[in-house]
Amino acid sequence: MSEYKPPLDTRMAAHHRIEPTKRQTCDLIMQFAIARGAYGLTADELTAAWQCSPNHVAPRITELKASGLLVTTAILRLTRAGSPARVLVARQFNKPFALIAPSQFPSTDCKSPTESLFGDLTPTARYPD
């Protein structure tokens, strides 16, 4: 008879794997939110700018909202897929939409198209010509 091995708790294993980078990711999200000011961000806009998976930022956004550092507004913007998404702002920019002047809207290009949270993601040729 073989020895019983308890099943691996994949949730805890994932947590331990990303624990060292959680604070850094939260800090980067807050820097992004502050740079966007009253215009705010959606999770989709963040993943597009960083060229990363929503799974990378969604848990951190949830934590930042729970801590009160990010605030959900009444404003909706469409995602790249065309679905409505709530806009989030850093708490210091939480004010009624009517107070946000168009001149306060930052450029949506917070990073160059090839720059991301994970470095340069410019495609490289796989096969020599």
Image (tube, grey):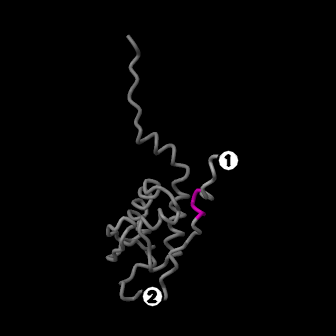
Q: What is the magenta range?
A: 114-118
Q: Which amino acid does label 1 sit on?
A: Pro
Choose mark 1 or mark 2, whichever is in front.
Answer: 1
Foreground residue among 79 and 39:
79
Residue 32 picture location, percent across and down = 52, 69
Q: In which quarter of the image is the N terminus?
A: top left
Taking the spot 53% from the left edge, 62% from the top edge, the residue there is 50
Foreground residue among 2 and 52:
52
Image quadrant where residue 62 sits: bottom left
Foreground residue among 5 and 121:
121
Residue 74 picture location, percent across and down = 32, 76
Q: Which amino acid does label 2 sit on?
A: Pro
Query: Going from the N terminus, do you reach mark 1 or mark 2 first?
Result: 2
Taking the spot 47% from the left edge, 62% from the top edge, the residue there is 47
Residue 73 picture location, percent across and down = 35, 75
- The residues tagged by marks 1 and 2 sit, at their Cα atoms, a distance apart of 48 Å
* 96 over 26 or under it: above or below: below
* 84 over 26 or under it: above or below: below
Residue occupying the far front of the picture = 129
Image quadrant where residue 83 sits: bottom left
Which residue corresponds to mark 1? 128
- Residue 102 image label: 2
Foreground residue among 11 and 119:
119
Residue 38 picture location, percent across and down = 45, 80
Q: Is residue 82 left or right of residue 44?
A: left
